Image: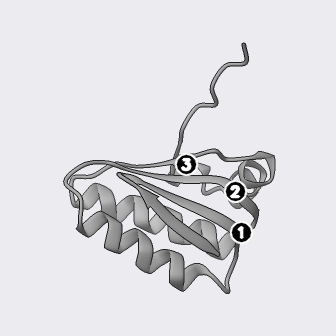
């Protein structure tokens, strides 16, 4: 998993699964702790995701809310959206609407 930041946005690239959840969890909480504004997690480059990874995002969303921040998921491809739906965690996270096609 490759994790970079661009201001308030954390950009994840690779497979987001049980093997990378610790790394991503630390990156999210470090990012939340260093900012005074909302955070976006960009999943455009995430090829696969599992339920463990989605739970990390759901808990981070809840914790961000407790701290007065807002966490939004961006770039959720079909496989990520499908897993959010199947796991019923779609209600626990906010997914940014896709840009309309021109």
Mark 1 lies on a secondary structure that is strand
Q: How crowded is mark 1: few (under 14 residues within 10 Å), some or many (20 or more)?
A: some
- For the residue pair 85 and 18, the one nearer the viewer reads as 18
Do labels 1 and 2 touch, CB within 8 Å?
yes
The answer to whether 41 appears left or right of 45 in the picture is left
Image spot of residue 43 (x, y percent): 62, 54
Which residue is found at the position 43% from the left and 74% from the top?
Answer: 27
Query: Which mark, residue 45?
Result: 2
Dot 1 or dot 2, earlier in sequence: 1
At label 2, counting other C-alpha atoms closer than 10 Å, the crowd grade (few under 14, some 14-19, many 20 or more) is: some
Mark 3 residue crowding within 10 angstroms, few (<14) / some (14–19) / many (20+)? few
Give how far apart the Cα atoms at labels 1 and 2 are: 6 Å
Q: In which quarter of the image is the C terminus?
A: top right
Q: In this view, does 30 lie to the left or right of 90?
A: left
Residue drawn at (44%, 68%), measured in percent from left and top? 59
Q: Is residue 25 left or right of residue 102?
A: left
Please state the total of marks drawn on the protein image: 3
From this view, report whether residue 30 is shown above or below residue 45: below
Q: Identify the residue position indicated by label 3 in the image.
A: 91
Q: Mark 1 points at which residue?
A: 14
């Amino acid at each position: 998993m490759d994790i970079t930041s661009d201001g308030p946005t954390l950009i994840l690239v690779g497979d987001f699964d049980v093997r990378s959840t610790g790394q991503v969890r630390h990156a999210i909480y470090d990012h939340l702790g260093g900012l005074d504004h909302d955070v976006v997690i960009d999943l455009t480059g995430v090829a696969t995701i599992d339920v463990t990874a989605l739970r990390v995002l759901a808990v981070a969303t809840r914790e961000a809310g407790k701290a007065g921040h807002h966490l939004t998921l961006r770039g959720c491809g079909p496989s990520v959206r499908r897993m959010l739906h199947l796991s019923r965690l779609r209600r626990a996270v906010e997914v940014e609407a896709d840009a309309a096609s021109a």
